């Protein structure tokens, strides 16, 4: 789909030329009348899709904050540190250490790119509404799905947000108030997409009616509307065209692109040397220098996340309440030239496909050598681990490219939603709905755990066998709703860690302050610089501050979130 963008913009230039230049729009643009056809609708629709990756012209705010894979959101939770040195991207350092301001360029950048997506979707809807002949119901459903997705992202981040309808767009009435949530509008767009999209799509990357149903279920889940969420999510599980891939790690390799597990993904591709259609906004998140001399050392997993992968050596189950009582051995403060023995205790095998640690193979590039691959200093707040899910594997040339200043551009698709996520959401709704179904919740959680158990495990670099002591088993039973709830929430972190979901889970569960306060204490124990710098977590952090620039430009129509 990304390649189509190039060809369609070339077509714009062709269509914009005519014999009578005095009646033609400027080259590179099209008149309203010229767009009123299938080609015009498709042009604008591709533009709406292209905002998914966070790359846009005329952007404002911090460009790195716009990344469609939401890696910044993991830095605001307990999955990841900013990474790199503390002085590189100092505003992100301030955000991680809870020094939030209304004038921050990171919040402004994300705000702007989401509204770019909303406006592009509205442009498609408005155009279709102006065309008197032809059937554009499918394109309209795609545009409304995309608008629902962008508004969902806005809602999750800011809570009290303005809604710009297609009528507002057509009338250029963009200055709308933000009196509260916009869940009704989000649900209406997803429901329209359910009713009007086909059940399958020929072109990869486009949503189907099943995609829309999964997103509508998730929207209700975020409102704790369990009785409505459950039948939607359960229908996707029971009757949709999805399944788990046999091997967990394939979700983050070429084999996982648009696979049976992919429900909706950003279509990254390395189609030329600069790879503008690759994950440009994720270019900071590679080892520095690492095994291939890359930049820039950001997005480092936390000790807390790695500790969560510890299991009971007898039962193979996670240590739900005690995982921080002992630490997976860290090489923080130990130079690469000094001896180090990796942790020998039992671990979930997903650990070494999520967190890069010393002594274990790093995505096929050989043994992680430790501090020599870490840009952060011992005096910085980010520790000693590297990300893995977003970093391409050795030999997978279809995912590898380099940008103009040497940065890495990955072609690994980002799963906005994959089937394992839906299984765990359906399990959660099964426990929380008015008539709980613990056996079904157990079945769905165990599908995820059994896939992890039966996947290929990371192998030792000397080919002597498994790289670590991997021990994992399914649950035998959920004794009660409280235990089931804790198990499902923990499983979401193990399965979806470093995929941009954790912050929003903690917010919707209402335990963000409690979890993050405990996290800061534990993380500071293993990474003292972090403990010395992190501030206080409070209820105001359940919503981002409305960018002061947006409030000023609105003339006071927009109001600030409480506490800022």
Image (cartoon, helix red, strand yellow):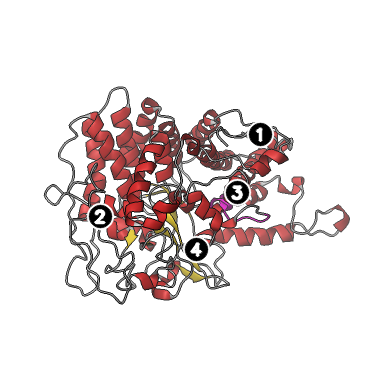
Of the two numbered discs 3 and 1 in the rendering, the one whose residue sits closer to the viewer: 3
Measured in 3D between alpha carbons, the distance from the residue under mark 3 to the one under mark 4, in whole angstroms, is: 19 Å
Residue 352 on image: x %, y %: 28, 60
Instruction: Give the structural element (helix, strand or loop) at label 1.
Output: loop
First reached walking from the N terminus: tag 3 or tag 1: 3
- Note whether 374 is above or below 16 in the view shown: below
The image shows residue 292 at horizontal and vertical percentages of 42, 75
Taking the spot 55% from the left edge, 31% from the top edge, the residue there is 182
Residue stretch rendered in magenta on the structure: 47-58
Query: Residue tagged by mark 2?
Result: 327
Residue 168, picture quadrant: top right
The residue most toward the front is 532
Q: CA distance from mark 3 to mark 2?
A: 35 Å
Q: CA distance from mark 1 to mark 2?
A: 46 Å
Q: Nearer the viewer, residue 515 or 528?
A: 528
Q: What residue sits 57% from the left and 34% below the top?
A: 561
**Distance from the alpha carbon under mark 1 to that under mark 4:** 33 Å
Disc 4 secondary structure class: loop
What crowding class fits label 1: few (fewer than 14 Cα within 10 Å), some (14-19), or many (20 or more)?
A: many
Quadrant of the rendered structure where residue 398 is? bottom left
Element class at badge 2: loop
Q: Secondary structure at mark 3?
A: loop
Give the number of the disc on residue 284: 4
Q: CA distance from mark 3 to mark 1?
A: 17 Å
Give yes or no for contact between labels 1 and 2 (Cβ–Cβ under 8 Å): no
């Amino acid at each position: 789909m990304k390649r189509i963008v190039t060809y369609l913009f070339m077509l714009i230039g062709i269509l914009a030329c005519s014999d009578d230049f005095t009646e033609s729009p400027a080259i590179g643009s099209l008149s309203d009348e010229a767009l009123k056809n299938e080609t015009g609708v498709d042009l604008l629709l591709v533009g709406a899709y292209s905002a998914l990756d966070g790359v846009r012209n005329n952007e404002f705010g911090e460009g790195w904050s716009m990344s469609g894979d939401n890696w910044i959101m993991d830095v605001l939770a307990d999955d990841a540190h900013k990474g790199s040195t503390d002085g590189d991207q100092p505003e992100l350092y301030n955000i991680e250490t809870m020094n939030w301001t209304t004038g921050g360029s990171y919040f402004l950048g994300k705000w702007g790119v989401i509204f770019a997506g909303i406006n592009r979707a509205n442009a498609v809807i408005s155009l279709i509404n102006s065309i008197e002949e032809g059937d554009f119901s499918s394109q309209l459903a795609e545009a409304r799905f995309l608008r629902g997705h962008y508004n969902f992202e806005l809602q999750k981040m800011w809570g009290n947000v303005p809604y710009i309808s297609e009528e507002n767009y057509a009338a250029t009435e963009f200055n709308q108030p933000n009196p509260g949530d916009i869940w009704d509008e989000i649900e209406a767009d997803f429901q329209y997409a359910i009713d009007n999209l086909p059940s399958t799509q020929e072109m990869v990357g486009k949503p189907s009616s099943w995609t829309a149903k999964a997103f509508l279920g998730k929207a209700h889940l975020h409102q704790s509307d369990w009785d409505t969420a459950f039948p939607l999510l359960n229908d996707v599980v029971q009757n949709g065209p999805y399944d788990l891939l046999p091997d967990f790690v394939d979700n983050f390799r070429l084999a996982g692109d648009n696979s049976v597990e992919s429900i909706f993904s950003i279509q990254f591709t390395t189609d030329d040397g600069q790879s503008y259609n690759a994950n440009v906004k994720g270019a900071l998140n590679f080892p520095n220098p690492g095994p291939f001399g890359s930049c820039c050392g950001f997005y480092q997993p936390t000790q807390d996340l790695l500790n969560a992968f510890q299991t009971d050596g007898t039962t193979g189950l996670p240590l739900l309440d005690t995982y921080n009582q002992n630490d997976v051995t860290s090489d923080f403060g130990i130079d690469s030239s000094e001896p180090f023995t990796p942790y020998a205790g039992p671990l979930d095998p997903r650990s070494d496909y999520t967190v890069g640690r010393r002594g274990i193979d790093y995505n096929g590039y050989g043994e992680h050598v430790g501090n020599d691959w870490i840009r952060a200093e011992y005096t910085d707040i980010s520790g000693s681990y590297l990300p893995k899910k977003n970093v391409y594997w050795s030999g997978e040339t279809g995912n590898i490219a380099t940008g103009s200043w040497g940065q890495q551009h990955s072609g690994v698709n980002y799963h906005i939603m994959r089937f394992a996520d839906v299984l765990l959401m359906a399990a959660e709704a099964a426990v929380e709905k008015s008539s709980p179904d613990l056996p079904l919740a157990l079945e769905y959680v165990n599908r995820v755990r059994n896939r992890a158990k039966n996947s290929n495990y990371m192998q030792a670099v000397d080919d002597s066998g498994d790289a670590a002591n991997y021990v994992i088993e399914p649950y035998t039973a959920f004794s009660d709703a409280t235990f089931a709830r804790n198990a499902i929430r923990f499983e979401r972190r193990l399965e979806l860690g470093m995929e941009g979901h954790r912050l929003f889970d903690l917010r919707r569960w209402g335990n963000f302050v409690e979890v993050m306060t405990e996290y800061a204490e534990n993380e500071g124990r293993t990474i003292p610089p972090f403990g010395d710098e992190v501030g206080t977590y409070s209820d105001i952090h359940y919503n981002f501050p409305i960018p002061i620039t947006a409030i000023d430009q609105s003339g006071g129509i927009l109001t600030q979130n409480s506490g800022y």
